[in-house]
Image (cartoon, rainbow, N blue to C red):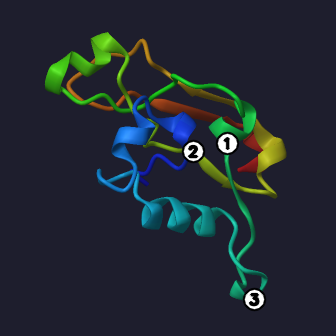
Amino acid sequence: MNVAPAEADLRNAKTNYNKTPGYTADECEAFAATLNPSEDSGHGKLIDVWRQRNPDRVGAYTYFSYRFQCRTKGIGWRLDHAVVSERLLPEVRACEIRAEAYGASDHVPIVLDISRSAL
């Protein structure tokens, strides 16, 4: 979804708010509305699984800019999300950000493990 939905989801929230794509009021509000649609929309509530399981955790990021050695300095954003319906939430066994994974991308993997019985 490429949005850091809350201050806890990026390292320098105050200096980026409403100045940097991915952390603007419009994007944060749209993400919240996607997770919590109005009752007349016909859509059910969705859950940001990682945040639901880690409500107070800061410093867990899925994106690090290549500029300025951001990954080495721990300057990141949690832009990638595993989102499920409320119905599916009880079937989620694990949701992890794999920060130790290095590769060609400036994003790190987020893994969602769902019980086979749910599929």
- Dot 2: element: loop
Q: Residue furthest left?
A: 67
Query: x%, y% of residue 18?
Result: 37, 56
| Foreground pick, 116 / 29 | 29
The answer to whether 30 is drawn above or below residue 98 in the figure is below
Mark 1 to mark 3 CA distance (whole Å):
24 Å
- Dot 1: element: helix
For residue 40, which numbered disc appears in the image?
3
User: Which quarter of the rendered picture does the N terminus lie within?
Assistant: bottom left
**Crowdedness near tag 2: few (<14), some (14–19) or many (≥20) residues, C-alpha within 10 Å:** some
For residue 100, which numbered disc appears in the image?
none
Mark 1 to mark 2 CA distance (whole Å):
6 Å
The image quarter in which residue 90 lies: top right
Q: Residue furthest front?
A: 14
Amino acid at dot 1: Val
> Residue beneath label 2, please?
82
Query: Measuring 72% from the left and 84% from the top, which residue is drawn there?
Result: 42
Contact, mark 1 vs mark 2 (Cβ under 8 Å): yes
Query: x%, y% of residue 19?
Result: 30, 53
Q: State the count of labels.
A: 3
Locate residue 117 relative to residue 11 in the image: left or right. Answer: right
- Dot 3: element: helix
Mark 2 to mark 3 CA distance (whole Å):
25 Å
The answer to whether 82 is drawn above or below residue 36 in the figure is above
The image quarter in which residue 77 lies: top left
Amino acid at dot 2: Ala
Query: Measuring 40% from the left and 49% from the top, which residue is drawn there?
Result: 17
